[in-house]
Amino acid sequence: MQEMITISIIGAKEVGKSALSTQFCYSRIIEEYDPTIESYRKQIEIDNEILIVEILDYDYFFTDSDEIQNLKKENYRKSQGFIVVYSIIDRNSFDELQNYLNEIYLIKNCDDFPIVIIGNKNDVENLRQVKKEEGEEFAFKNGCSFYEASSGRRNNVDESFLTLLREIRKYPFDSKSNSKSNSKSNSNSNSKLNSKSNSNPNCLIF
């Protein structure tokens, strides 16, 4: 049976999450989609093995209803890795990154996890608000791999997803959950969220 890997792609509104997902899965951008209920699947070969990749792409900001928030927690729990996206032309989307990471670590009950950070829309350099060095520094501090990408030009799209998939396959998951084996308690994890050193020696910066 082929291995199934589930990942979530998250970030602020209009940073290009769905465009990245559809470019990776279908090599094109789908113009019309339901922003509240989206998932994609793709069969790929990676390191001579066939995998089925499920990408959960939900806009949890559409409503603050308990139903949507519970769905978010459920999806986070079953995800084995995360793509966290900001737009290089939107400073606010970058400033929110730490909140996303904190939420992942809280729900997953650990202080490190397979995460790739993408600074999207680097094809509109003239509108840049976030320097590449800022993204690199943030990712390094949090032990995450980092890419600047363009969903429009399909630049670094495959590379970002494949890096995450390789990190997932090396991560020591608990056999009964999608959290880290022997993970620390919430109290230990939360104390590290805002002072986390680069604990991932394999993180990639592009």
Image (tube, rainbow, N blue to C red):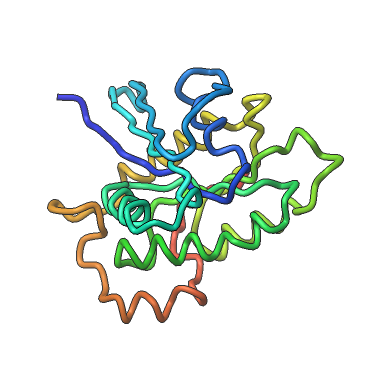
At a point 58% along the width and 45% down the height, the residue shown is 118
Q: Is residue 66 above or below residue 41?
A: below
Q: Position of residue 63 (x, y in %)?
A: 46, 52
> In the image as oriented, which residue stretches furthest toward the right?
126
Expressed as whole percent of the image width and height from the top left, the position of residue 82 reads: 42, 48
The residue sitting at 31% across, 81% down in the picture is 187
| Closer-to-camera residue (80/12) | 12
Q: Position of residue 14 (x, y in %)?
A: 62, 42
Residue nearest the viewer, comparing 80 with 136: 80
Q: How many numbered marks appear?
A: 0
Residue 58 horizontal/vertical position (percent):
43, 42
Q: Quadrant of the C terminus?
A: top right
Tell me: 182 left or right of 61: left
Q: Quadrant of residue 172?
A: bottom left
Residue at the (48%, 18%) spot, across then down: 26
Q: Looking at the rendering, which quadrant does residue 190 occupy?
A: bottom left
- Give me the residue at 37% from left, 41% from top: 7
> Horizontal placement of 203 versus 13: left or right?
left
**Image quarter in which the N terminus is found:** top left
